[in-house]
Image (cartoon, grey):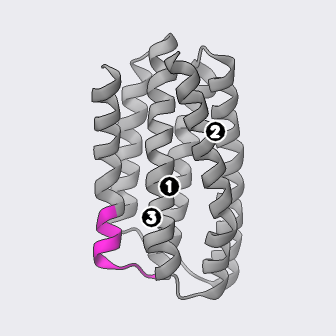
Amino acid sequence: MNKTVSGLVFAGVLAVPFASASAQGVTDPQIASIVVTANMVDIDAGKLAESKAMDPQVKAFGREMVNAHTGVNKSATELVTRLKVMPEDNPTSMSLQSGGDENVKSLEKLDGAAFDKAYIDHEVVYHQQVLDAVDKTLIPGATNAELKALLVKVRPAFVAHLEHARHLQMTLSK
């Protein structure tokens, strides 16, 4: 799969889930499910990158995604447990999981530089989509102040991940 096609496929997989959340509004239990699912999707892809990436920087980025998103999920789980909020599956979280599964299946078929490039291309698109959802849907939609505060607190990490992925994307394009 060439760069343009893979980027469009990944962007298409991501655009629908977050757009549907924005269109329908979300509740705190749905936000909790979206946050946990979005992190798990990136953890799964990161684990694959840790094991398959050829470029040491891509491998390290995958490890960073696993560690960072595991930490966010731990914080989110502790918060919703303390608040007695049960995460509620919704079309967005289910579509995120489906898209994440499709991404991993696509990446599993690739090796070497093709894997590295496809993984990083996906990470750029994915983190931009997550940031858009955090800014336009999740933070404005959160009614619980602590949930909203957690989303605001973790936002800079997603920005840093996006910038790191873009840097790697440029490095791999050379």
Give whichever of discs 3 and 2 has the lower sequence position.
3
Task: Write the residue at 70% across / 39% down.
Answer: 64
Few, some or many C-alpha atoms within 10 Å of disc 2 (few <14, some 14-19, many ≥20)?
some
Depicted 118 relative to depicted 151: above or below? above
Q: Which residue is mark 3?
A: 133
Residue named by callout 1:
38
Name the kind of residue labelled 3 in the image: Ala
Check contact, mark 3 vs mark 1: CB within 8 A. Answer: yes
Q: Residues within 10 Å of mark 1 (few under 14, many from 20)?
A: many
Nearer-the-camera pick, 90 or 63? 63
Does 149 appear above or below 65?
Answer: below
Which of 11/91 is in front? 11
Q: CA distance from mark 1 to mark 2?
A: 18 Å
Whole-angstrom CA distance, mark 3 to mark 1, is 11 Å
Residue at the (36%, 27%) spot, across then down: 106
Report how far apart the C-alphas of labels 3 and 2 lie in the structure. Answer: 19 Å
**Magenta region includes residue 20:** yes
Element under label 3?
A: helix
Residues in magenta, as a range = 19-27
Q: Earlier in the sequence, mark 1 or mark 2?
A: 1
Q: Nearer the viewer, mark 3 or mark 1?
A: 3
Q: Give the mark nearest the N terminus, 3 or 1.
A: 1
Q: Identify residue type, mark 1.
A: Ala
Residue 87 visible? The answer is no
Residue 85 x %, y %: 57, 81
Locate residue 165, reporting x and y percent: 58, 37
Numbered circle sitting on residue 164: 2
Disc 1, SS = helix
